[in-house]
Image (cartoon, rainbow, N blue to C red):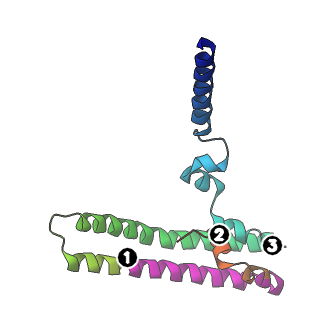
Amino acid sequence: MKSIKVFISTIMIASIAVSSLLAQPGNGKQGMRGEGKRAMGDPAKRVIMQIPDLSEQQKSAIQKKAVETRKDILPLRNEMNEKRAHLQTLRTQESADLDAIHSTIEAIGELRITIAKERATMHQDVRQILNEEQRVWLDTQAPMKRAGKRMRGR
């Protein structure tokens, strides 16, 4: 009887130890959350640099355009983040001002549209740098793949 209790206790301790080890993040991408995404670089840049037969001149021109676009988008993203923080403050106030909430949502939407237009402009500028074969390759990439996004269950 005593040996059965010892055996069961040993199995329980071993199973707890194994389950706690499995719950720890590993060295792979799964346990890295946001850090892993940043470490891999800009997904759109990775796809653009996969375009076949890019010359050094094309790479340089694309990188220059990408840097310009990021510089243009950065203040817009910062402003959008500020508006989101302000929206959170408005939403959680004791007596919410619905007009202020609505106008802040509108402002965030306008910023998102402006950022999307900047990205579309950059995409068209990159297409102008490419030859016919490279443009076809870029255009046949799925938009979600181009943006480096995965489909999420929504």
Q: In which quadrant will I find the N terminus?
A: top right
Q: Which label was assigned to residue 22?
A: none
Dominant secondary structure of the residues highlighted in magenta in the image: helix
Give the image quarter of residue 126. bottom right
Mark in front: 3 vs 1: 1
Question: Residue 99 occupies which quadrant of the picture?
Answer: bottom left
Q: Quadrant of residue 79?
A: bottom left
Residue type, label 2: Ala
Residue 102 falls left or right of residue 58: left
Residue in the picture at 28% in, 79% down: 102
Q: CA distance from mark 1 to mark 2?
A: 23 Å
Marker disc for residue 54: 3
Of circles 3 and 2, the one toward us is 2
- For disc 2, the marked residue is 44
Q: Taking 17 as reference, is 6 above or below it?
A: above
Residue 108, numbered circle: 1
Kindly give the residue lying farthest to the left in the view shown: 95
* Residues shaded magenta: 108-136
**In percent of the image, x 67 and y 46: which residue is there?**
28
